[in-house]
Image (tube, rainbow, N blue to C red):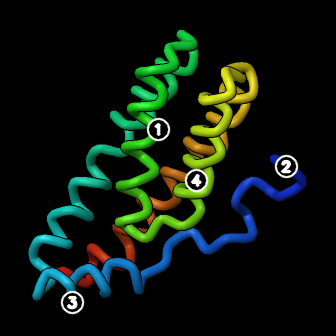
């Protein structure tokens, strides 16, 4: 699938582990960052469902609220690919192109789930 001539996030890394490590340094330790990463992972399904429902209803305000939340939290978690997709979906919503937004939802779901799996198997597993 392409968007604007690019493969939908496929050329970006799924997860940038340096983002969370940098956040650990900024906050003086890993505890808060591990809690954030756990919350990010546990809220993924709820976040995706909220975005999908709002896009299906063509509810611009709710869709923007949900996708911006996904974009910001994904960027903080180092989810490079899902952040890119959230930005693309946000642009479609702002343009009122809910049909294209619906098409992008499959990639958002797949890449978001893959991001959560990667986060759990790499970063969160190191919390030991």
Name the spot of residue 56 as percent of width and height, x first: 57, 15
Residue 61 vertical position relative to residue 117 in the rendered view, above or below = above
Q: Is 63 or 48 nearer to us in this picture?
A: 63
Sooner in the amino-acid sequence: mark 3 or mark 1: 3
Q: Could you tell me which residue is drawn at 10 percent across and 76 percent down? A: 31
58 vs 19, left or right, is right
Q: Within 10 angstroms of label 2, few (less than 14), some, or many (20 or more) residues?
A: few
As helix, strand or loop, the secondary structure at mark 2 comes to: loop
Q: Which mark is residue 35?
A: none
Q: Within 10 angstroms of label 3, few (less than 14), some, or many (20 or more) residues?
A: few
Q: Disc 4 versus disc 3: distance between alpha carbons? A: 27 Å
Q: Within 10 angstroms of label 1, few (less than 14), some, or many (20 or more) residues?
A: many
94 vs 49, left or right, is right
Sooner in the amino-acid sequence: mark 4 or mark 3: 3
As helix, strand or loop, the secondary structure at mark 4 comes to: helix
Look at mark 1 in the image and give the residue it sits on.
Answer: 67
Q: Disc 1 versus disc 4: distance between alpha carbons? A: 14 Å
Q: Is 71 or 103 nearer to us in this picture?
A: 71
93 vs 71, left or right, is right
Look at mark 2 in the image and give the residue it sits on.
Answer: 4
Q: Disc 3 versus disc 2: distance between alpha carbons? A: 36 Å
Name the spot of residue 44 as percent of width and height, x first: 37, 45
Look at mark 4 in the image and give the residue it sits on.
Answer: 111
Sooner in the amino-acid sequence: mark 1 or mark 4: 1
Sooner in the amino-acid sequence: mark 1 or mark 2: 2
Q: Could you tell me which residue is drawn at 19 percent across and 72 percent down? A: 33
Look at mark 3 in the image and give the residue it sits on.
Answer: 25
Q: Disc 3 versus disc 1: distance between alpha carbons? A: 27 Å
């Amino acid at each position: 699938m392409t968007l604007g001539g690019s493969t939908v996030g496929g050329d970006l890394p799924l997860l940038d582990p340096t983002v969370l490590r940098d956040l650990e340094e900024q906050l003086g330790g890993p505890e808060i960052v591990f809690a954030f990463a756990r919350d990010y992972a546990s809220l993924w399904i709820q976040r995706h469902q909220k975005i999908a429902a709002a896009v299906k209803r063509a509810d611009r305000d709710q869709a923007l609220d949900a996708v911006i939340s996904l974009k910001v939290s994904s960027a903080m978690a180092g989810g490079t690919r899902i952040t890119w997709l959230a930005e693309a979906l946000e642009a479609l919503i702002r343009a009122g192109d809910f049909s294209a937004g619906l098409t992008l939802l499959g990639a958002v779901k797949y890449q978001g789930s893959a991001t959560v799996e990667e986060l759990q198997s790499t970063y969160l597993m190191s919390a030991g």
